[in-house]
Image (spheres, rainbow, N blue to C red):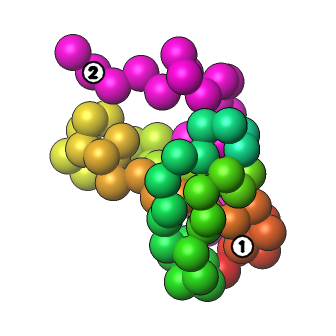
Amino acid sequence: MPLDLTRTMGSRRVETRRGEAYIVQDIPAANAQKEYSCPGCVIPIAIGMVHLVAWREEGLFGEEAALRDRRHWHIPCWKSGR
């Protein structure tokens, strides 16, 4: 069964970055239950910190592989395109 993040996190949107489409989903503080390392600045995203998760809309190896390759970002890092 495919992983459905919309049930636990909320709505998704598509954003274009460097000519590629990404699915972007906000993670509210209540759902931020693990620590992640932001790929933009490599500073940890603490438990309970509002952030977002993004993955390519069309992954090379299909939708499931793209979803597995998703990354958690600080919102300012994502917006700045770091």
Tag 1, which secondary structure?
Answer: helix
Q: Is residue 26 visible?
A: no
Foreground pick, 13 / 20: 13
- Disc count in the image? 2
Q: Can residue 5 be seen in this view?
A: yes
Check residue 2 in the rendering and tell me which mark sits there, or answer none.
2
- Name the quarter where the N terminus is drawn: top left
Q: Is residue 22 magenta?
A: yes
Residue 43 percent across, percent down from the top left? 59, 82
Q: In which quarter of the image is residue 38?
A: bottom right
Label 2 and label 1: CA atoms lie apart by 28 Å
Q: Does the magenta stretch include residue 59?
A: no
The amino acid type of the residue labelled 2 equals: Pro
Instruction: Locate residue 75 relative to residue 45 in the image: left or right.
Output: right
Report the residue at 56% width, 41% height from top: 23
Pointer 1 residue: 77
Residue neighbourhood size for the residue with mark 2, other residues' Cα within 10 Å, grouped as few (<14), some (14–19), many (≥20)? few
Report the residue at 66% width, 80% height from top: 82
Sequence-first disc among 2 and 1: 2
The amino acid type of the residue labelled 1 equals: Cys
- For the magenta stretch, what is the residue range? 1-27
Tag 2, which secondary structure?
Answer: loop
Check residue 23 in the rendering and tell me which mark sits there, or answer none.
none
